[in-house]
């Protein structure tokens, strides 16, 4: 029984580390290919590839400064997600063989990381991008399904991580 509890704890550390690696990859990709990813934000906010005659066009933001601020905000949020994920990974790994209360308490930064992830991909992309800026109407600049996919994976990881751990001696 103790081995399975420890194995589950290591699995939790692994999914948090994989989340952090995912966030880091996206964060670095946005920095290394700034212009391509900036275009995504620019087109979504401008709503220039949504349905012609779209009655929601009053929501469009065409100011390049606003595009830059939004994109930098996304990059910062992705960086925070990554940092919180790596901190959580380290905390959890350091405490993986300790008592259940200590290990459970070491998950705090994982919860914070997943909150940031939900703010980025569910709020930012699914709610703001897809619904407010009608990103779902675009054949070219539509990240709605990707945002939902990422959100679903993060929910699954959060559920696994949030399961209370028992003592290793049980």
Image: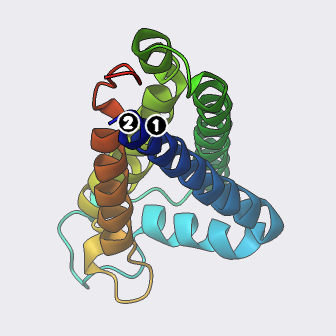
| Camera-nearest residue between 84 and 90 | 90
53 up-or-down from 164: above or below: below
Report the residue that reaches farthest toward the left: 55
| Camera-nearest residue between 60 and 153 | 153
Horizontal side of 6 relative to 38 (left or right) equals: left
Horizontal side of 26 relative to 52 (left or right) equals: right
Query: How far across and down, in percent of the image, does residue 99 sit?
Result: 47, 13
Q: Is residue 128 visible?
A: no
The structure residue drawn at horizontal position 64% and vertical position 70%, both measured from the top left corner, is: 37
Horizontal side of 62 relative to 24 (left or right) equals: left
Query: How far across and down, in percent of the image, does residue 28 sit?
Result: 76, 59
| Mark 2, residue position | 5
Report the residue that reaches farthest toward the right: 32
84 up-or-down from 67: above or below: above
Residue 45 picture quarter: bottom left
Estimate the spatial distance between the alpha carbons at disc 2 and disc 1, rounded to whole Å: 4 Å
| Camera-nearest residue between 54 and 156 | 156
Query: How far across and down, in percent of the image, does residue 151 sit?
Result: 33, 55
The structure residue drawn at horizontal position 29% and vertical position 51%, both measured from the top left corner, is: 156
The structure residue drawn at horizontal position 39% and vertical position 33%, both measured from the top left corner, is: 2
Instruction: Please say if the residues under marks 2 and 1 sit with CB atoms less than 8 Å apart.
Output: yes
> SS at mark 2?
helix
Residue 164 picture quarter: top left
The structure residue drawn at horizontal position 67% and vertical position 52%, both measured from the top left corner, is: 68
Task: Identify the disc placed on residue 6.
Answer: 1
> SS at mark 1?
helix
52 up-or-down from 102: above or below: below
Task: Identify the disc placed on residue 85.
Answer: none
Query: How far across and down, in percent of the image, does residue 102 sit?
Result: 49, 11
């Amino acid at each position: 029984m103790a081995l399975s509890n420890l194995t589950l704890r290591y699995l939790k550390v692994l999914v948090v580390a994989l989340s952090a690696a995912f966030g880091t990859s996206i964060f670095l990709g946005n920095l290394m290919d700034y212009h391509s990813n900036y275009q995504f934000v620019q087109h979504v906010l401008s709503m220039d590839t949504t349905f012609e005659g779209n009655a929601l066009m009053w929501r469009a933001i065409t100011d390049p400064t606003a595009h830059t601020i939004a994109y930098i905000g996304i990059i910062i949020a992705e960086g925070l997600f990554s940092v919180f994920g790596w901190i959580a990974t380290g905390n959890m790994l350091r405490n993986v063989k300790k008592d259940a209360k200590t290990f459970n308490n070491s998950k705090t930064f994982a919860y914070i990381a997943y909150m940031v992830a939900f703010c980025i991909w569910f709020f930012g992309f699914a709610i703001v991008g897809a619904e407010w800026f009608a990103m779902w109407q675009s054949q070219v600049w539509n990240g709605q399904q990707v945002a939902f996919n990422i959100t679903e994976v993060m929910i699954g990881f959060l559920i696994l991580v949030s399961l209370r751990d028992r003592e290793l001696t049980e």
